[in-house]
Image (cartoon, grey):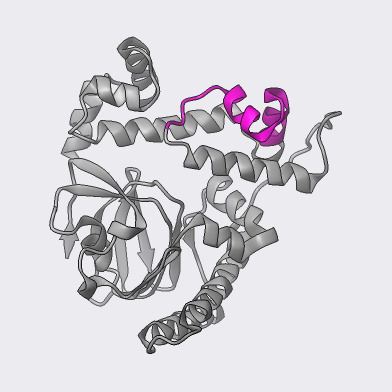
Amino acid sequence: MKYTKSGQAQSFDIGSMFLTEEKQTYKDNDVIIFSDVRRLAQIFYGADDETMLRPEMNIALYCYKGKLTFDVNGQNLTVNNGQMFICPPNMILSDFMFSANVECLVMCFTTRLLQESLRDDFSEWNKGVYVDKVMILNATADDQQLLKSYCDVLVKRVKHPETVYHKRILHSIVQATLLEICERIRREESVETTAIEKHDNVRSPQQSRNLFDQFLAILNAEPQKRHPVEYYAEKLYISPKYLTVICKRESNKTALEWIQEYVIEDVRYHLSTPDLTIKESAEQCGFSTLTHFGRFVREHFGCSPREYRKKLRKQ
């Protein structure tokens, strides 16, 4: 079963994710859980078969039978039996293919719930997902049994008649599952330790990591990412120089490099939206003139905005 998506990329809020009650497994303001992975296409695409998925929620998908393939921001990924796929918000997913025997559990959850569930370990998630860019988690045979057990408990609880504590119990199981995922993210990380020069104004490692997490959260939530470093530093009540030092210390990338990376994905997304003209796409991405926009697109995509839009439509 294949869904080939081209054309308009849409962004969805939680309330619009389920088109009919029949498609709903479980949802509240922070969590959506379903066990039929084919619903990814049905839930987010609905009747319109010419869209790409850009969810505003985090996704954790555990495949315990068969396999599935799809594109994430143009990169093709395969999730095999025993593997888990994790994805932050606002990534473009498309071109789904499922094996006939595929069985998965899919959890979609807000960053708010993620922060509440992981608490002090939220930095580990951010480092794995945003810095190390871990998307596929492998599991040992023991891990697979354990993760499958969580999936079974979640499915059983979802199917259980609602009670006074139904939501709280589900959120507790989701929290435990997210902690298990976070533990596996730490195992996957293979980052070389580099010496970081001391800076007079750099605070404790935990304060530094907290500020870095806040910066990523603000950057991720900002509708228009293309702002100077000063803009984000002001929101954190620190100097631009200090923000750059923190980013370099925590991720080996500067604050400007992080902003640039997000702007590139914004450009890709808005150029994939046919309802917008090139000029409107430029404005949505924060470019004041078409000249600056064209120069940016040529620098990062190797062609003009119009040519790149044609390439996206052919995918």
The residue located at (26%, 45%) in the rendering is 10
The residue located at (35%, 59%) in the rendering is 78
Which quadrant of the figure contains the N terminus? bottom left
Residue 202 percent location from the top left of the image: 81, 34
> 171 and 68: which one is in front?
171
The residue located at (71%, 30%) in the rendering is 238
Magenta span: predominant SS is helix
Q: Which residue lies furthest to the front in this view?
A: 164
230 displayed left or right of 90: right
The residue located at (67%, 28%) in the rendering is 244
Residue 247 percent location from the top left of the image: 66, 35
What range is drawn magenta here?
Answer: 224-248
Residue 254 is at least partly visible in this image = no
Residue 173 percent location from the top left of the image: 53, 78
185 displayed left or right of 210: left
The answer to whether 193 is drawn above or below residue 99 in the figure is above
> 154 and 96: which one is in front?
154
The answer to whether 126 is drawn above or below residue 116 in the figure is above
Residue 225 percent location from the top left of the image: 46, 31
Which quadrant of the figure contains the C terminus? top left
Residue 113 is at least partly visible in this image = yes
138 inside magenta stretch: no
189 displayed left or right of 29: right
232 inside magenta stretch: yes
